[in-house]
Image (tube, helix red, strand yellow):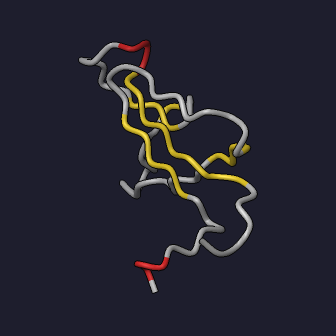
């Protein structure tokens, strides 16, 4: 692997109050809502230190990106 791993970026989607039947989805802890025109908001990730573990809450979806990693298979 080449490059220096400095951080990771994550998007964590969870149901409001942990209720799987909730009508509201939280993006990194904040309600994810469409704009008045129906446009989907930017899915901005949070930056997480490499020393912190990735925690996945029940009934959630997590996407993690390691921006400084250059995998040989991806060349």
Q: Residue at x 57, y 75 (%)?
A: 70
35 to 25, vertically: above or below:
below
Question: Which residue is situated farthest in the left direction here?
Answer: 21
Task: State the image quarter where residue 1 is shown.
Answer: bottom right
> Is residue 65 found left or right of 57 in the rendered image?
right
Q: Residue at x 64, y 52 (%)?
A: 8
Q: Nearer the viewer, residue 64 or 74?
A: 74
Task: State the image quarter where residue 59 is shown.
Answer: top left
- Residue 33 in the image: state x and y as whole percent: 44, 40
- How many numbered discs sit on the rendered protein? 0
- Residue 41 in the image: state x and y as whole percent: 48, 53
Task: State the image quarter where residue 57 is shown.
Answer: top left
Q: Residue at x 37, y 27 (%)?
A: 24
> Is residue 39 found left or right of 70 in the rendered image?
left
Q: Nearer the viewer, residue 36 or 9?
A: 9
- Residue 3 in the image: state x and y as whole percent: 70, 73
- Residue 20 in the image: state x and y as whole percent: 27, 18
63 to 57, vertically: above or below:
below
53 to 6, vertically: above or below:
above
72 to 21, vertically: above or below:
below
């Amino acid at each position: 692997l080449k490059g220096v791993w400095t951080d990771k970026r994550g998007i964590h989607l969870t149901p409001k109050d942990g209720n799987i039947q909730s009508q509201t989805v939280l993006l990194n802890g904040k309600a994810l809502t469409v704009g008045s025109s129906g446009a989907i908001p930017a899915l901005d990730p949070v930056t997480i230190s490499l020393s912190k573990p990735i925690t996945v809450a029940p009934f959630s979806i997590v996407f993690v990106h390691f921006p400084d990693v250059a995998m040989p298979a991806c060349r």
